[in-house]
Amino acid sequence: MTETDVLPALVESEHLGADAPAPQTPWRSRFLLPVLLPLLSLAVVAVLVLDISRVFLAGDKDAALVMGIALTVAIMLGATLIAAAPRLRSSTVAMILGGVFLLVSAGGLVSLGPSLDEGTAATPELGPARATVTVVAKQGNEFDADDYTAPAGVVRFELSGEPGHTLAIADPQFSDFELRTSGGPSSGKVDLPPGEYRLSCTVTGHAATMHATLSVTE
């Protein structure tokens, strides 16, 4: 084959390559993935935020602090391990993330009931209340009054006001009674004999200024 026979073939192949149609991108890559991936990511983030918030709300302040520290340490350790092993297969990373998602989702489902308990404190069946004591948590870590009164017998307490406060009776026989302005029961009943009782907020550092006296008379 001579040089004159090769040149026309090369010219023809270059011409065909320039005019050849560009490869078609699948419609899934052009339309489906750009739409579904952001939506799926938003759904996963929403589920994780909801589940983690339910886990925090289900416990008291100390449990929430411990869970927050544990979650932060777990995230940092996971990120460190993934960064230290850049050759991890995509399937391995997907399995790890899937396991974390399932674990957090299970924790959120388990704590769903307690975290939604914002109604009445769980107390024995005491019958109708003789009186209602309404306590309002104000700004500056104080209640709306220094003294409250109620007749002896079943008394209903109603707590409202600024979030992040509690109401408890400083008496060992009522140690299980605690109301919350947020994330817990805000009302409940107690059978009180005559006497004077100290009411206070159990949040660390609040009781110094957030306390009052309840006088129960016959």
Image: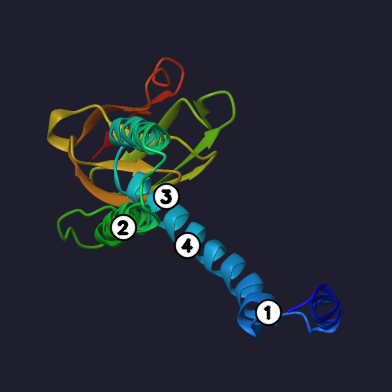
Residue at 39% x, 43% y: name it. 87
Q: Earlier in the sequence, mark 4 or mark 2?
A: 4
Disc 4 to disc 2: CB gap under 8 Å? no
**Residue 203, relative to residue 63: is it above or below?**
above
Q: Earlier in the sequence, mark 3 or mark 2?
A: 3
For badge 2, the amino acid type reads: Met
Instruction: Nearest to the eye among marks 3 and 2: give it.
Output: 2
In three-dimensional space, the C-alpha distance between marks 2 and 1, rounded to whole angstroms, equals: 29 Å
> Quick one: 196 or 78, which is closer to the camera?
78
Q: Earlier in the sequence, mark 2 or mark 1?
A: 1
Residue 89 image offset from top left, x and y in percent: 36, 52
> Label 3 crowding class (10 Å Cα cut-off): few <14, some 14-19, many 20+?
some
Residue pointed to by mark 1: 25
Residue pointed to by mark 4: 44
In three-dimensional space, the C-alpha distance between marks 4 and 2, rounded to whole angstroms, equals: 15 Å
Q: Earlier in the sequence, mark 4 or mark 1?
A: 1
Residue lying furthest top: 208
The answer to whether one can see residue 152 in this image is: yes
For badge 1, the amino acid type reads: Thr
Task: Find numbered disc 1 in the image and state the secondary structure of the residue it sits on.
Answer: loop
**Residue 159, relative to residue 41: is it above or below?**
above
Tell me, for residue 53, which label it has, or none.
3
For badge 3, the amino acid type reads: Ser
